[in-house]
């Protein structure tokens, strides 16, 4: 029983010391240059991520949209070849 109470007392003292020590942290004031450096580093890292995501999206969209656009161009070309002139657009 004494061992359990001793361990509990030690843990509670350590825990209370931790809480007291964490409350006394001073605010860190950054200089303008340091703040700008941190902003630039975060910005450049995030910009690389955004650009790579945009490239992936573009490649994905190209595979889908180019095929549809090419099909419509081939259909118009086939109509021109058979009619000899550009067909009039249909009114819907």
Image (cartoon, rainbow, N blue to C red):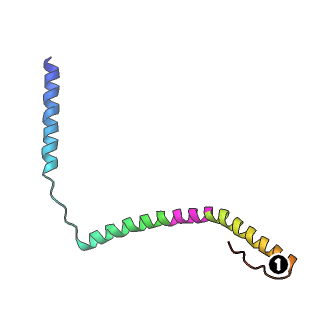
Element on which disc 1 rests? helix
> Which residue: 75% across, 67% down?
71
The crowding category of the residue bearing disc 1, from other C-alpha atoms within 10 Å (few below 14, some 14 to 19, many at least 20), is few
Q: Name the main secondary structure of what is drawn in magenta.
A: helix
Residue drawn where x is 52% and y is 62% of the image: 53
Along the horizontal axis of the image, is 62 left or right of 26?
A: right
- Residue extending furthest toward the top: 1
Q: Nearer the viewer, residue 43 or 62?
A: 62
Rendered residue at 17%/37% (across/down): 15
What is the span of residues highlighted in magenta in the rendered image?
51-60
**Mark 1 highlights which residue?**
80
Q: Please tell me in which quadrant of the rendered image residue 6 appears.
A: top left
Q: Residue furthest front?
A: 92
Q: Position of residue 11 (x, y in %)?
A: 17, 32
Depth check: give the residue in front, 92 or 10.
92
| Relative height, residue 22 to residue 28 (above, below) | above
**Image quadrant in which you'd find residue 19:** top left
**Image location (x, y in percent) of residue 67:** 71, 65
Q: Is residue 75 within the magenta segment? A: no
């Amino acid at each position: 029983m004494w061992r359990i109470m001793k361990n509990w007392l030690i843990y509670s003292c350590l825990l209370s010391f931790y809480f007291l020590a964490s409350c006394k942290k001073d605010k860190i004031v950054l200089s303008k240059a340091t703040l700008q450096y941190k902003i630039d580093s975060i910005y450049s890292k995030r910009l690389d991520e955004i650009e790579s995501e945009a490239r992936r999206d573009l490649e994905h969209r190209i595979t889908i949209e180019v095929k549809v656009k090419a099909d419509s161009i081939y259909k118009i070309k086939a109509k021109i070849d058979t009619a000899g002139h550009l067909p009039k657009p249909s009114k819907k």
